[in-house]
Amino acid sequence: MRIGLFFGSFNPIHIGHLALANYMVNYTDMQEVWLVVSPHNPLKKKSQLLNQNDRLHLVNLALDFHPSIKASNFEFDLPQPSYTINTLVRLKEKYPQHEFSLIMGQDNLTSFNKWKNYDEILKRNHIYVYPRPNCGPSEFDEHPNIHITEAPVMDISSTFIRNAIKEKKDVRFFTHPKVWDEIDTMNFYKK
């Protein structure tokens, strides 16, 4: 099976994440997309993250048992911070029958050379890139394992949602209704 790995903090998951995952399942050769909740992205401050199990719960609520898009806690038991190269090695050990590709935003591709063992990742995996606002070309665009997609540009971020919630703004339509209800009920991101 061809699986797309969409890594993220999902802090919180929003409609942009869902639309992009849906696009990848429908417009590429991926049969499934796994939303891999990262306990700690080495390029982000951990103190700003909601608990990993709460974030995973919100992702599961957002997916509402979608047949081709699944939540994954695979990185929860791996050493932190989470490095993509380590996760890929472990995934291939555990699921040798699957072919894994990465899904990343164009903004990440421009800084891809800062990733641990980025050259190994690029050599062994296909990477599907979705456009991001105000991002130009990168040095990797012409690589045979890079696939620039025509996914819709999603100018929405989890940071925007967290800040809006702190400011007591109603941003319910930026998330799945069940996610919004859970955020509101549990008072997530209000402090």
Image: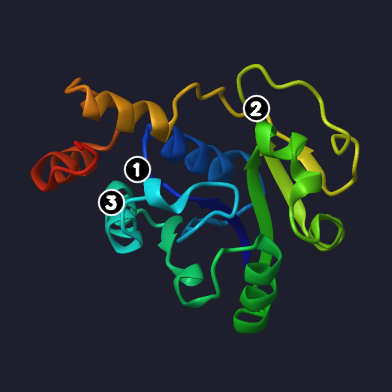
Picture layout, residue 78 above or below residue 141: below
Q: Quadrant of residue 57?
A: bottom left
Picture layout, residue 95 above or below residue 41: below
Q: In the structure shown, which secondary structural element does the residue marked by tag 2 occupy?
A: loop
Residue displayed at 65% across by 27% down? 131
Q: Quadrant of residue 108?
A: top right
**Chain-order first, disc 2 or disc 1:** 1
Q: Position of residue 140 (x, y in %)?
A: 86, 39
Residue displayed at 58% across by 63% down? 82
Q: Quadrant of residue 166?
A: top left
**Chain-order first, disc 1 or disc 3:** 1
For label 1, the residue is 12
- Label 3 to label 2: alpha-carbon separation: 25 Å
Judge left or right: residue 69 versus residue 85. left
Judge left or right: residue 131 versus residue 53. right
- Between 8 and 49, the one lying in front of the other is 49
Asked if disc 1 and disc 3 are in contact, CB closer than 8 Å, the reply is yes
Amino acid type, callout 3: Leu
Amino acid type, callout 1: Pro
Q: Residues within 10 Å of mark 2 (few under 14, many from 20)?
A: some
- Label 2 to label 1: alpha-carbon separation: 20 Å
Q: Which mark is residue 131?
A: 2
Judge left or right: residue 20 versus residue 136. left
Residue furthest out toward the top? 134
Q: Which mark is residue 58?
A: 3
Q: Position of residue 182 (x, y in %)?
A: 16, 46
